[in-house]
Amino acid sequence: MSPAGTDGAGTGVPASGARGRFVAYARLAKFEFVLDYYLSMLVLWTALAGSVRFAGDTWTTLLLFLLGEIGVISAVMALDDVNGIKDGSDRANYLGTGGTPLRPLERKPLLTGALTVPQATRFGYLSLLWGTVFWTASAFAAPERPLWALVVTGLVLFAGFQYSWGLKLSYRGLGEVLIMGCPLVIVVAPYGFVTGHLPAIVLVQAVLFGLWQILVSCYSNTKDISGDAAVGRSTVAVHTSARGNLVFIGALSAVDLLLTVGASAVGWAPWWFFAALLPEMALRLRQFTSFSRNGDALLARRRGVVAFRTGVAGIVLANLIHFAS
């Protein structure tokens, strides 16, 4: 592990050529893994009434918000990697004591030496600027600008990139809040910019969207306990026992199932809404029960990704049926 305060960057071959640099920066932004975040647009777009869904100002607002979202998320991922190199946590979590890769190293271009710390830092700040410009443009182009949508967008813009940078909120026990809250906001905020209000069914779907993200990340945190503890990152997995962490993950999984069924039961969603999410619920149960037996956090993480995508497909199907008129 590199000592805190050093760059600790890899000594491999730097990325060269336009294609090589593009791939390296895409990997820095974790584009392969954060594509799921951009499904927020599909969720909220299908939740719009038919007449609103195809309006010109709707498309303009959502396109600008999506472009800004790409910038903001890229900034979060890039600056997280810079911090991970500087404090040594990425080496601890991706390389064994003998230097043997524990995970595919190409995911970390700073570890492989494809990019330098100054390049990654510059990319992070430019991405944040990109996100700020396009989210501001989205708000100005929006047919509606409710105060709550402006506030939550501003909160994500301010706090998101400080997950590991600046205030280092994940080192202060707020990592799980950000991992769930930011995906939630990128559903409700653009919906508010288009419609000016927030119905219960959209809020439920946004909460599920965020909850499904934390039900991927909490398994990553379980795998990363030793590396995170060594650098002071404050996660539930670091601060609790193995059983306490299992209880925490089990509680989140239970909330997922209860909210899905409960939304139908109390009228926040159509009575049949839960049926569209039965495949997701089955996958969630499998994810948790399997992890509780074998403790394989990375397998559970992969299953969480599948459950997330299955759940989004269920929500989109439900929306297309419910908002068909």
Image (cartoon, rainbow, N blue to C red):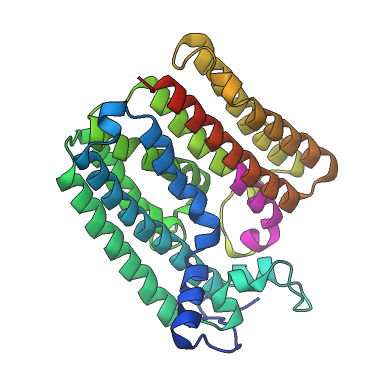
In the image, 113 versus 267, the foreground residue is: 267
Magenta stretch: helix, strand or loop mostly: helix
At 32% from the left edge and 63% from the top edge, which residue is drawn?
Answer: 128
Image quadrant in which you'd find residue 320: top left
The answer to whether residue 71 is left or right of residue 208 is left
At 20% from the left edge and 35% from the top edge, which residue is drawn?
Answer: 147
In the image, 20 versus 75, the foreground residue is: 20
First to last magenta residue range: 215-229
Q: Is residue 218 magenta?
A: yes
In the displayed structure, 305 sits above or below 133; it is above
Image position, residue 92 (x, y; %)? 67, 69
Q: Look at the image and tell me in which quarter the N terminus lies.
A: bottom right
Image position, residue 325 (x, y; %)? 35, 19
Image position, residue 27 (x, y; %)? 52, 69
The single residue placed furthest to the right in the displayed view is: 293
The answer to whether residue 128 is left or right of residue 39 is left
Q: How many marks?
A: 0
The answer to whether residue 24 is left or right of residue 200 is right
Image quadrant in which you'd find residue 215: top right
Q: Is residue 187 magenta?
A: no
In the displayed structure, 77 sits above or below 123; it is above
In the displayed structure, 223 sits above or below 199; it is below
At 20% from the left edge and 52% from the top edge, which residue is drawn?
Answer: 136
Q: Is residue 286 visible?
A: yes
At 41% from the left edge and 57% from the top edge, which residue is drawn?
Answer: 73
Image position, residue 131 (x, y; %)? 30, 58
Q: Is residue 258 visible?
A: no
